[in-house]
Amino acid sequence: MSSRSSSDTIAAIATPPGRGGVGIVRVSGGDAASVLRALVPKWPDDTPAHKLRLSQIRDTNGELIDESLAVYMPSPDSFTGEDVVEFQCHGGPIILRRVLDATLDAGARVAEPGEFTRRAFLNGRLDLTQAEAVADLVNATTESAHKMALEHLHGSLGGEIEELAETLTEAVVLVEAAIDFSHEEHVYQIESDEVGGRIDEVTNRLKRLRDRFDRGRRRREGIRVVILGPTNAGKSTLFNALHGTDRAIVTDVAGTTRDFLEEQLHLGGVAIRLTDTAGLRDTDDRVESLGIQRSRQLGERADLVMWVVDRSQGLTDEDRRDLQKLAEEDDRPTLVVVNKSDLPGELTDQDQQLLANFEHRFDTCLTADPPQGVEAIADALAELGAELTAAEGVLLSRARHLEAVVDALDALTRAREGLDMQMEHELIAIDLRDALDALGTITGRVDTDDILERIFSEFCVGK
């Protein structure tokens, strides 16, 4: 975000690029009303606030640009908390560009990405969790992501953090009161019990938020599903079948895929970020080796792994080691896809016993027309996706939220240890304030320029 003054009047096209039935040019700031009168010279002074009025929009030379709806929303009853004007025009790009140019000629400047929402935050209309929810609501592509963004916009996360901050504030007050009356011995024990209870309450609630972070992150970003397995097992064919396109190149040459491909699916109201990877094998090819290394890294970060087995080739020792490791994991599911069911099988009894450890196993013939077994895999992905995003109550969804919660928990651990060891009250107060500061970065009670830059740089212009 640049150093341009927050007192400037800003303007932007607030609808997506391209042609449409309606396009909106938004203006916000102290000169919004004068911009309105410059573009609509015949605007009646007695027009009620927040009422759409059919108007002729003209440039500063008086030339007609469009006949459209205009509305004036005075401070503080607007999205930004400032005077706001919107021109709801016909959605042609030339019209919108000319209306925007006219607002600039009338004294506004072009808004930067996220500047409207940033002003809403700075003017107290939103806290940071609600501001982020605006961007999440715009970018939501599934029902689960939309629902969580709407909950955050309505203040569920911000309200939870504020409740915890209030409880910690009470603890700080008690500790500082103990400092003031430390010469009275009975005061310390009474305050210690009350402070400890508040620390424990906040700690337990923060731990619940921390432990459910992955579920919130999956709702917002989608579930990371990585397809792994040896070369020529059918990974790219499976990727194409699930995506419904020929996105990945498929040949009978081993090692065709040398880098990863990622596409998004929507299954059962959940976003699936499906990734095809290079086949796993020993190779002297430097480029393919880099692709294999990247495949393993993606597999380690996946929420769910799909391992494709070539039934006609059986398992190598390396395959067995990888599958055994996946079978021993309890914190994430693995789907085993045994492909090429139309060919003679080379799986040993040992291989069959290993594959039997996986709850989700599918026999497929992906080269059939249509591919056999894909619908069952898609149904399983939808079911597992619902499980991986299911949670009751408030959820964290961004890495910065988790970082702040972890920092707060660290500070509370120190405060609790200091309390149990009857350390100096001043040291306990410092740790409690550190926890408060960490929580404050989530809602904006404590803010810095770099935090705001990180948040609002994700927005599109006009929001």
Image (tube, helix red, strand yellow):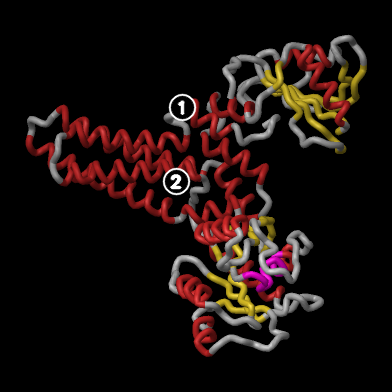
Residue 183: x and y in percent read 7, 30
Residue position for label 1: 448
Residue furthest out toward the right: 64
User: What crowding class fits label 2: few (fewer than 14 Cα within 10 Å), some (14-19), or many (20 or more)?
Assistant: many
User: What crowding class fits label 1: few (fewer than 14 Cα within 10 Å), some (14-19), or many (20 or more)?
Assistant: few
Magenta stretch: give its range: 231-239
Q: Quadrant of the N terminus?
A: top right
Instruction: Name the element at disc 2.
Output: helix
Labels 2 & 1 near each other (Cβ < 8 A):
no
Q: Is residue 234 magenta?
A: yes
Give the camera-side residue of 99 and 358. 358
In the rendered image, is residue 325 in sight?
yes
Quadrant of residue 28 within the rendered picture = top right
Q: Is residue 320 magenta?
A: no
Amino acid at dot 2: Leu
Number of numbered tags placed on the structure image: 2
Q: Is residue 262 left or right of residue 44?
A: left
Residue position for label 2: 402
Give the camera-side residue of 152 and 185. 152
Q: Is residue 98 left or right of residue 31?
A: right
Q: Quadrant of the C terminus?
A: top right
Q: Is residue 10 left or right of residue 42?
A: left
Instruction: Name the element at disc 1.
Output: loop
In the rendered image, is residue 390 in sight?
no
Amino acid at dot 1: Thr
Q: Residue at x 42, y 39 (%)?
A: 162
User: N-terminal of the two: label 2 or label 1?
Assistant: 2
